[in-house]
Amino acid sequence: MILFKCQVCNYIHTGDEAPDKCPKCGAPKEKFVELNEEDTNKVARSEFTNGLHMELYNALQEVEDISEAGIEDDLDPGCVAIFNKAKEQAVLLKKMIVAELETHVKRNKWGVE
């Protein structure tokens, strides 16, 4: 995998060569630099980890939805307590994921510096 990074907007392109024009900002081919192996590996790891965060977020949304259905069903206090706790934890973990991804963006962990 060969990655090229636009020095104007940080867009990362995968291919055998840089594009003639940046699809994000329109910068010419000359504004792209080929990333070295270490930086390419950082991008791949970031994409993998951030993808895991999104999968977990989606699974937690399912937990939240299931919990709301259980709360609404209201079979008995024990069941409702479990569903309330599950919903509370799912909401908390989703907020933590959003905060972590925001940190990744600020630290440029979607790409490389």
Image (tube, rainbow, N blue to C red):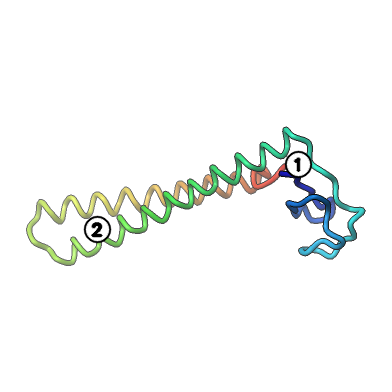
Mark seen at residue 113: 1
Q: Is 41 above or below relative to 62?
A: above
Q: Badge 2: how crowded within 10 Å, few (<14), some, or many (20+)? A: many
Residue 43 x/y as whole percent: 66, 42
Work out whether residue 36 or residue 94 is closer to the camera in this orientation and state it: 36
Instruction: Using the rendered image of the protein, determine whether residue 38 is visible from the camera's viewpoint.
Output: yes
Quadrant where the N terminus sits is top right
Question: Which percent across, then down, holds residue 28?
Answer: 90, 60
Disc 2 to disc 1: CB gap under 8 Å? no
SS at mark 2 in the image: helix
The disc at residue 67 is: 2
Residue visible at 22% across and 64% down in the picture: 69
Name which residue type carries label 2. Ser
Q: Is residue 43 left or right of residue 71?
A: right
Residue at coordinates 28% horizontally, 54% vertically from top-left?
87
Give the residue furthest to the front: 16
From the image, which quarter does the C terminus lie in?
Answer: top right
User: Circle 1: is it few (<14), some (14-19), or many (20+) Cα within 10 Å?
Assistant: few
Say which amino acid is labelled 1.
Glu
